[in-house]
Image: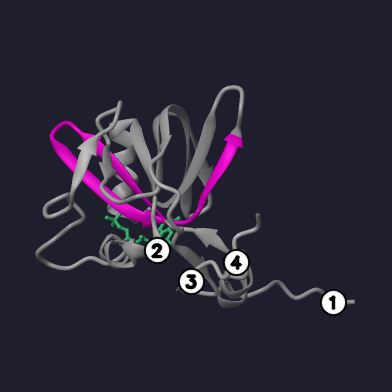
Amino acid sequence: MRIVPPSKDDFRRTIGRFATGVTIITTRQGHHLHGMTANAVTSVSLDPLLVLVCVDKTADTHDILLKAGVFAVNILSINQQEISQKFATKNAEWTHGMEGVGYRAGATGSPIIEGCIAYLDCRTVTEQHGGDHTIFIGEVVEAAELSDGEPLLFYAGQFAALRHVAQ
Ligand SMILES: Cc1cc2nc3c(=O)[nH]c(=O)nc-3n(C[C@H](O)[C@H](O)[C@H](O)COP(=O)(O)O)c2cc1C
């Protein structure tokens, strides 16, 4: 049997069937605050407490994260689809700073966005090469659930909502 490697589109469509939540990764480098929508976020370890985020090497966030050494994972609610789209698209006037966004500073100084349902504030401990992405592994220094509202989901290339919450 000849095994044909999948194309990028096949890969994207297939991995897109893995439903995820949606986050905004925020960071602070000096006075500069920055954010980016991300769903390649995973829990890694309980001892120590580690999470990872995979960031495209061409994203502005990539080099900012390398220098900042800190990031917060803001887990978005179903009511935050608009802000999620904003932090996933660039325009000439706005380059993913925090202007017009409600937030407070977390323990590392990274912005914690108003209305998110939970957050994890992290110090980067390792950066691993991952093809055209870098895997940033962060040790969690602060975490909180802020509401038990519904999460925003991403599935098959589209935003989605929970239909049923298991009891
Ligand atoms: C639902 C969703 C999830 C995304 N997940 C990631 C991700 O995990 N890693 C990544 O590098 N880009 C991801 N992106 C794309 C970035 O949000 C997008 O390229 C953004 O404009 C990068 O911003 P920056 O240049 O300010 O870093 C995602 C986009 C969407 C809509």
Q: Which residue is mark 4?
A: 164
The span from disc 3 to disc 1 (Cα, nearest Å) is 36 Å
Which secondary structure dominates the residues rendered in magenta? strand
Q: Is residue 79 left or right of residue 10?
A: left
48 to 3, vertically: above or below: above
Q: Circle 2 sits on which residue?
A: 78
Q: CB under 8 Å between callouts 4 and 3? A: no
Disc 3 to disc 2, C-alpha distance: 8 Å
Nearest to the observer: residue 2 or residue 161: 161
Q: What's under tag 4, amino acid-wise?
A: His
Percent position of residue 98, x then y: 17, 49
Q: Position of residue 73 (x, y in %)?
A: 40, 43
In the rendered structure, find residue 2 and report the number of the disc placed on it.
1
Q: Secondary structure at mark 2?
A: helix
| Quadrant where ligand 1 appears | bottom left
Q: In the rendering, at what x and y percent does residue 62 appear?
A: 34, 46
